[in-house]
Image (cartoon, grey):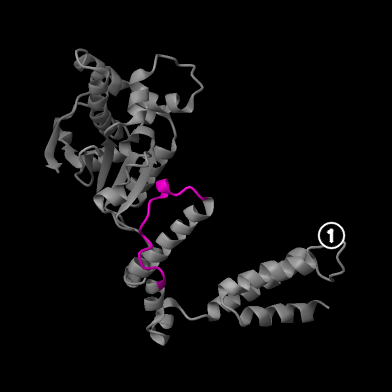
Amino acid sequence: MVWPIRSRISSLLSANSPLVASHVYESWWFSRFSGPPTSSLTRPWPKFMDWIQMDRCRTAASLPSIEEKQTEDPGYCVRLDGENKGLDKGNMSETDDYQNLFGLMKQRFMSFKNQKYIKELEHFQALAEAQSPKFMVIACADSRVCPSNILGFQPGDAFMIRNIANLVPPMKSGPSECNAALQFAVTTLQVENILVIGHSSCAGIETLMNMQDDTKSRNFVHKWVANGELAKLKTTAATAHLSFDQQCRFCEKESINQSLLNLLSYPWIEDRVRRELLSLHGGYYNFNNCSFEKWTLDFERCNVKEEGSSYVVKEQDFWC
């Protein structure tokens, strides 16, 4: 009983593409064999499922690769390009319908695949084997600040982490997803540059500047942005005569430099910076006028201490 069923499924899978095979597997199997545990099948369910999975893998392995498909039918990508012409148009914020949101996402993916992936297939196949990015980027999670879009980072260029207010906590604060990513980027990938990117109108910095001292707060956002407390203190001391909005703009940049100093609290970062194997940079994106400021931390002239640390920057540039 089992073998004829398996043979039937194998023939169905072999005759169709992975997409169709997946549909056959899901709809045909569950419509006929999703019965109670007391099924009359002579083999247990998991074993039978393993057979089906093996058949699906064999079928996928026997299909031509992308390169083979292109050679076999040169018009293949052209047809796809025609079907997806202008798919990168549109804005998700202007799309309300659930299906349309994912429809737009699918269209953008297909546009990427046909316009980028297939045309640079050798590059993407090399990336599939290993990555060796030059940059580690720490940016804000704000939806308006996308480093890949703004600075043109391509797949393989930058190892990234994004969090509220683009903060780097000091080592003494303990483990976090930020310093875990930093350790992997610096010690394993051995990136040559770390770039911390802040931006205008940052809600995280505004929250920090508005916060009252409350060490027992259970608010996750408050607990996280408290990592920028030193930047807030320096801002308050230097800008007491300015408006609150101006203080926030000042703190947006001050917090970037404090994060650069916090990076040096990690021995494996400080060591590579000292040996000139790693450089630390700050960046500030103003989306009100679409300008970008870039600078580099001058390690030799910085004073890194538990209290009273100071920094000096160099190689300042302004892009507008």
| Residue holding disc 1 | 37
User: Main SS type for the magenta part?
Assistant: loop
Q: Quadrant of residue 66?
A: bottom left
In the image, is 264 to the left or to the right of 176? left
Residue for point 34% across, 50% down? 159
Instruction: Give SS at disc 1.
Output: loop
Residue for point 77% across, 78% down? 5
Image location (x, y in percent) of residue 237: 22, 14
Magenta-drawn segment:
83-97
Give above or below for 95 relative to 115.
above
Q: Amino acid at mark 1?
A: Pro
Residue 88 is one of the magenta-drawn residues: yes
Residue 148 visible to the viewer: yes
Give above or below for 1 relative to 201.
below
In the image, is 103 to the left or to the right of 284? right
Image location (x, y in percent) of residue 168: 34, 33
Q: Quadrant of the C terminus?
A: top left
Residue for point 23% across, 45% down? 278
Give above or below for 119 relative to 255.
below
In the image, is 126 to the left or to the right of 96? left
Q: Residue furthest bottom?
A: 72
